[in-house]
Image (tube, rainbow, N blue to C red):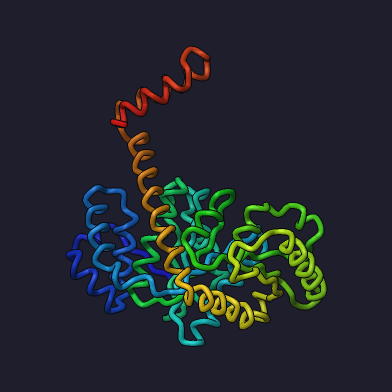
Amino acid sequence: MSDASSPASVSSASVPALGEAILAGERAALARAITLVESRRADHRRQAQALIQQLLPKAGKAIRVGITGVPGVGKSTTIDALGSYLTAKGHKVAVLAVDPSSTRSGGSILGDKTRMARLAVDPCAYIRPSPSSGTLGGVAAKTRETMLLCEAAGFDVILVETVGVGQSETAVADLTDFFLVLMLPNAGDELQGIKKGIIELADMIAVNKADGAGAAAARAAAAQYQAALHILAPASPLWSPPVITISGLTGEGLEALWSKVEAHRARHEAKGLIAEKRRRQDVKWMWAMVQDRLQARLRHDPALKARTPELEAAVAAGRLAPTLAAEEIAQALGL
């Protein structure tokens, strides 16, 4: 079920009380808290930090799955079907989005909610788009904070969708325990166009739309993707990324998909690798927030805003060396 809240609703509750309400599973409190962490106001940021610190010991128990795929691959349909399958098994599912390219709509889930018709009305599901902060580090940081809040509220499966391009896949891989790449059944040219980096991130490839007339093409594509994976060394000696066929439309293959996710988690958790991976992710999160703060200073500091266009023009015209311009900006930032 999708929820939203206005910033004004946050001020009515103290941070400790808000935290207790989230731990009690109150959806309205969760919505207020997410609005708080998404706010750019300095006082809200301080409150959000206190809230995250309060809830941190109660978070971190969920299975975090990142999901990516090219436009048209059927991400929304698959997430709707997978999420519904999981809630039917007794899980509580939160669906989050990372979309740094969308600075107007606020993430694809706002536009695609009709394609998640079952999850949108499921009391055991929660759908939340990413904030339109316009920077990858900022979006990823807010998504991570939202993820922690959802975990504290009792959601035990977090599905994080990347709908952007370029580095957004890496950002989602750095947020999650398991990275699922959805592919179309027509391999051929598609196979040639796969970015090697995305394949290296994948813990599993699922060829979608393996239903009806597309079933045979999906099986053929899966064989080609499996052959492509054999060329690459697996990221972990404990896991060779499988390739399966699914249908987000009919639900075919979703049970097998989730069993692979659980097998991956069990195998890595037994060796302490999930906790180790999350510690590395926390360090990256720290630096992403530092970078976001520096970029915020560049955007909002009056003196820097006035001086930056002049420096850019001077560098572009060849009147000023880029190193000197960078040095001036760094000094203005106190670096």
- Write the residue at 30% across / 29% down: 302
Instruction: State whether residue 194 is above or below residue 273.
Output: above
Q: From the image, which quarter does the N terminus lie in?
A: bottom left
Residue 143 percent location from the top left of the image = 42, 59
Where residue 232 sits, quadrant-wise, is: bottom right
Does residue 288 lie above or below 278 as drawn?
Answer: above
Residue 16: % across, % down? 18, 68
Nearest to the observer: residue 290 or residue 300: 290
x, y percent for residue 136: 47, 48
Q: Looking at the rendering, which quadrant does residue 153 occupy?
A: bottom left
Does 228 appear above or below 222? above
Q: Residue at x 63, y 56 (%)?
A: 198
Q: Please report the residue visible at 49 percent of the width from the left and 83 percent of the height from the top.
A: 87
Q: Is residue 118 visible?
A: no
Specify whether residue 194 is in view: yes
The answer to whether 134 appears left or right of 206 in the picture is: left
How far across and how far down the image is residue 114, in percent? 55, 69
Residue found 54% across the figure and 59% down from its top: 162
Q: Is residue 288 above or below residue 232?
A: above
